[in-house]
Amino acid sequence: MIATLRGKITEKFSDKIVIDVSGVGYGVLVALEDYAKLNKGDEIKVYIYEHIREAAHDLFGFTSMDTMRLFEQLLGVNGVGPKMALGIMGIGSADDVRQAIAAGDTKFITTAQGVGKRVAERIVIELKNKVGLLSTANEDSLFIGTATAEQDEAVQALMALGYDVQDAVAALKGVDSSLPTEDKVKQALKGQK
């Protein structure tokens, strides 16, 4: 399994780049957000998602682990394949896509090529509470570092009790972070009563 590639961009096509790694050129499909930032001759490191099928072996590359996590979350939705997920990520930045999902903006999601209303609704239903955003009444969004939040033991404990990431983080807001995990969870549960 290929986890990362580090090398020089030798070619840039409409939908992919070629990264030369010690004399071997890897064709890597990249999200539009990353594609716009990359130039021929750049030395880069990309996180790789491998998609192996009977007739193809595709590599999808991301300049940040956070963007790759969003891609993988999209793949977890029934009916969304790698090319569709990449297309969804091409309609805006990763944060724009997260915000649209958290806000239930299916209209924005359907602007991606090949994404119909039903698939967009399924994406919103399945990912609304998993994308690392809290939607508020005035349509502003607060990004929660999901990588950090999901690694926090107190958040994990609350999630094991049935909380989603956002609710767990909200319950722990105001709880002294220097407390042991068990005490943090107790304080969060007391505050929810």
Image (tube, helix red, strand yellow):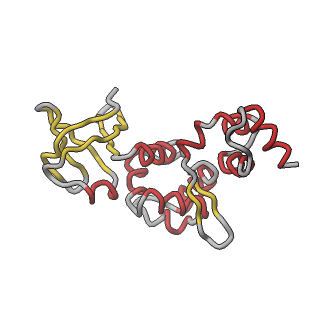
Q: Work out whether residue 147 or residue 163 is closer to the camera in this orientation and state it.
A: 147
Q: Quadrant of residue 179?
A: top right
Picture residue at 83% right of the left edge, 49% below the top: 192
Residue 122 in the image: state x and y as whole percent: 59, 53
Q: How many marks?
A: 0
Residue 43 in the image: state x and y as whole percent: 19, 44
Picture residue at 21% right of the left edge, 41% below the top: 27
The single residue placed furthest to the right in the displayed view is 193
Q: Is residue 115 left or right of residue 59?
A: right
Quick one: quadrant of the N terminus? top left
Residue 145 in the image: state x and y as whole percent: 54, 49
Picture residue at 37% right of the left edge, 37% below the top: 49
Q: Work out whether residue 125 or residue 94 is closer to the camera in this orientation and state it.
A: 94
The single residue placed furthest to the front in the displayed view is 178
Q: Is residue 98 above or below residue 182?
A: below
Q: Work out whether residue 108 or residue 54 is closer to the camera in this orientation and state it.
A: 108
Q: Is residue 15 left or right of residue 11?
A: right
Picture residue at 24% right of the left edge, 44% below the top: 44
Residue 79 in the image: state x and y as whole percent: 51, 47
